[in-house]
Image: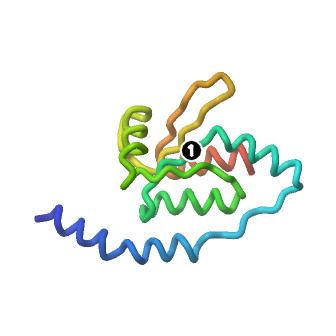
Amino acid sequence: MLRFFFKGLRLFLKPFMLLWAKLGTPKGMVRQPLAQQQIDSECATLALYHFSSCPFCIKVRHEMARLSLPVQLKEAQHDAKNRDDLLQGGGKVQTPCLKIVDEQGNVQWKYESNDIIKYLQHRFA
């Protein structure tokens, strides 16, 4: 019974969350073209696994927009392949999750929105 209540609540709140995601997106910072090009190439090694209406995912996507980071987005709620990749790589289906691949090809899976935001700010701000 409780499960159905929360499922119904999520369905009710989803349009409001999507509206907040769209209207609340901040303007991105403007960098010199060469600096933005460097940021773009560094972001090619990042992927954010997310659910479209998750408030924590929205918070991370807003910070990525504010920092003008073109991080690849992988929707894991309805895309079975992305969900399986998240489970196999990170060990759990929890979003947001940032997949980080370093220069040597080592993969790190970073969970928790605040940790992801701190990482992005430290690396790109």
Q: What's the residue at 17%, 61% (across, down)?
A: 3
Q: What's the residue at 54%, 32% (across, down)?
A: 108
Q: What's the residue at 17%, 66% (across, down)?
A: 4
The image quadrant that residue 14 belongs to is: bottom left
The image quadrant that residue 47 belongs to is: top right
Q: Secondary structure at mark 1?
A: strand
- Please indicate whether residue 69 sits to the left or right of residue 52 in the image: right
Q: Position of residue 15 (x, y in %)?
A: 40, 76
Q: What's the residue at 36%, 39% (across, down)?
A: 92
Which amino acid type is shown beneath numbered disc 1? Answer: Ala
Q: Kindly give the residue lying farthest to the top in the view shown.
A: 104
Look at the picture and state if 37 lies above or below 103.
below
- Please indicate whether residue 125 sits to the left or right of residue 118 in the image: right
Look at the picture and state if 76 lies above or below 10.
above
- Please indicate whether residue 79 sits to the left or right of residue 38 in the image: left
| Count of picture labels | 1
Identify which residue, 73 or 96, lies in the foreground: 73
Mark 1 neighbour class, 10 Å CA radius: few under 14, some 14 to 19, many 20 or more: some
Residue under label 1, please give it: 47
- Please indicate whether residue 3 sits to the left or right of residue 59 in the image: left
Q: Position of residue 27 (x, y in %)?
A: 71, 69
Q: Position of residue 113 (x, y in %)?
A: 50, 52
Look at the picture and state if 29 lies above or below 112.
below
